[in-house]
Image: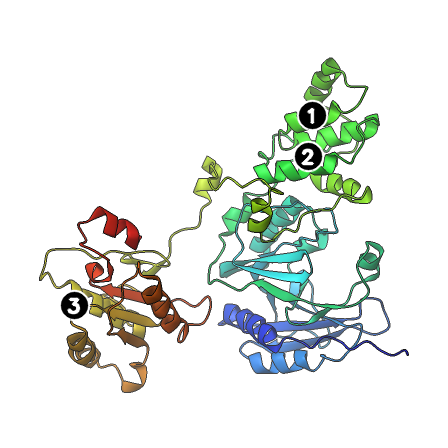
Amino acid sequence: MSGAVDLPAFDRTAVEGHVSLLHVLAEGLDGVLILAAFMPNGGGKPQVQRFRIGDVAGMVETIMGFENHRNLNLYAPWSVFRRDLEPGKKGSEADVVAVLAAVGDLDNDKYTIGELPVEAPYIIETSPGNFQPVYIFERPLAAADAKPVLAALCDFVGGDSATKDTSHVWRIPGCLNWPTKSKLARGRPPVPVLATIKKGYDGGFTSPAALLALAPPPRLPNGHDTKLGGSLSFAEEARLRGALAVIPAEDRDTWLKVGAALQLFGARAVWDDWSKTSGKFDAADQDRVWASFHGERKEGVITVATIYGWAKERGWQAQPFFEDRAGAQRDGQLPAPNPIKLLSYAEMTALPEGEFLIRGVIVRRAKNVLFGLSNAFKSFMATDMGGSVATGRSYHGNAVKKCPVIYVANEGAIAIGRKRIPAWMAAHEIPQSERANIYLVNVETILPNEISRNNLLAAIRSIVEPGEDFFLIIDVLRGTMTGSDRDDVARRDLT
């Protein structure tokens, strides 16, 4: 019996979440978002459609309309394009109004580096073992400002140079990934797979400076670097050693190119250990050639990405980029990573600036403690802050980020719920329609107690979407502890 294979259904939830995120990030910009449909192996003309910013439903329905189309890949750039873009045209960099994010192209079956030192707030798994970490900017960047950021990320990863293009299109999770001819040649199965969300957007942003810091140093005219590009992480060194284990060190041209690539990271020990597997190893020659990598040489310079490519050609299998490593570590297959990373001066100064839920008062995504003597009006201040954040009103002239507020009242819940919060709303003349963004917990909540803690988390998740900000007020702190707030054990259990 023969016939067409049934296609996996699109994941509408993933599509809606992704498209909504694009529109939220583009809000307020004068331009349009693009949806592009390409047939990876020919056979049809590309289809490009434009959507006004805010038309989430229209874009989602258009995407879902392609659900049963074979040999068709759907993409959307992380950029906003000019409103008067010609119909049917995707647009080029000259047409980009603003760039919303930088994206890495981490294909496990290509020659890309294995680990990125900057955590991505959103990760798409385009096919099993292949990922696109999305680094969302807090503010959209002009194309000219975004270009060096995208280039720095691409050069660090060692991926397709097209990803430096600010108008580049990227996969949409929830849609099918049909392999291209080049991917089929690299061993991909011909059956399409569903692109999925590996890590849902956590609400975070990436500083462009953090990605710019990944840029390799400037090169001399001969193609060599003027300075080292930084050291390898423990995991990356182990990965490189594994790749080199299947590459013979006998051929001098290969030996020279591997050394030049490793010199970029100052990985002399890795080169030495690999070189010693050859019967031609000469310590003096090793020293002389390593020193020569700083000088004028005519040989081509490769990157560690190409080393991975050579290893793949010899049967080496790379570990997935974003895998669950815990099981492998328990089984002794992988070394446990060092949880401490020493930040260089350049890295520490490139750390993103702190964000505030209440400017200058409450730090966003952090623990904040309001303390003082008894009867010092701490609860009144907490109510004042909560009301401001819930309604989006400034807190005594300080701007706030509006989000849901959950007030855990372990003392005086009736007074807070029936009197203080309504009194604040009335004093600030808040309309009834805008008073629904603050919630009260009036049952005892002991955070070190697993059942109590899980009940609170479940209640929060019932009103807060994944990745959405919320303001949790715990009043009073000692009411959530298993002992006195002066007891060291009780305080330790709470944290």
Q: How many angstroms separate mark 2 from mark 3 (CA)? A: 60 Å
Task: Find out whether the residues at labels 2 and 1 contact each other: C-beta distance under 8 Å.
Answer: yes
Count of labels in the image: 3
The answer to whether residue 233 is visible is: no
User: Which one is earlier in the sequence, the residue at label 3 or at label 1?
Assistant: 1
Q: How many angstroms separate mark 3 from mark 1 (CA)? A: 66 Å
User: Which one is earlier in the sequence, the residue at label 2 or at label 3?
Assistant: 2
| Residue at the image point whose x is 18% and y is 80% from the top | 418
Q: Which mark is residue 380?
A: 3
Q: Which mark is residue 273?
A: 1
| Residue at the image point whose x is 63% and y is 66% from the top | 196
Q: Does dot 3 land on a helix, a strand or a loop? A: helix
The answer to whether residue 113 is visible is: yes
Question: Where does residue 452 sit, x and y in percent of width and height?
Answer: 32, 66
Question: Where does residue 485 sit, x and y in percent of width and height?
Answer: 19, 53
Task: Find out whether the residues at labels 3 and 1 contact each other: C-beta distance under 8 Å.
Answer: no
Q: Mark 1 Cα within 10 Å, few/some/many (few <14, many 20+)?
A: few
| Residue, disc 2 | 241
Q: Does dot 1 land on a helix, a strand or a loop? A: helix
Question: Where does residue 239 sit, x and y in percent of width and height?
Answer: 66, 40
Hey, which quadrant is residue 315 in on the image? top right
Q: Does dot 2 land on a helix, a strand or a loop? A: helix
Toward the right, the furthest residue is: 1
Hey, which quadrant is residue 446 in on the image? bottom left
Q: How many angstroms separate mark 2 from mark 1 (CA)? A: 9 Å
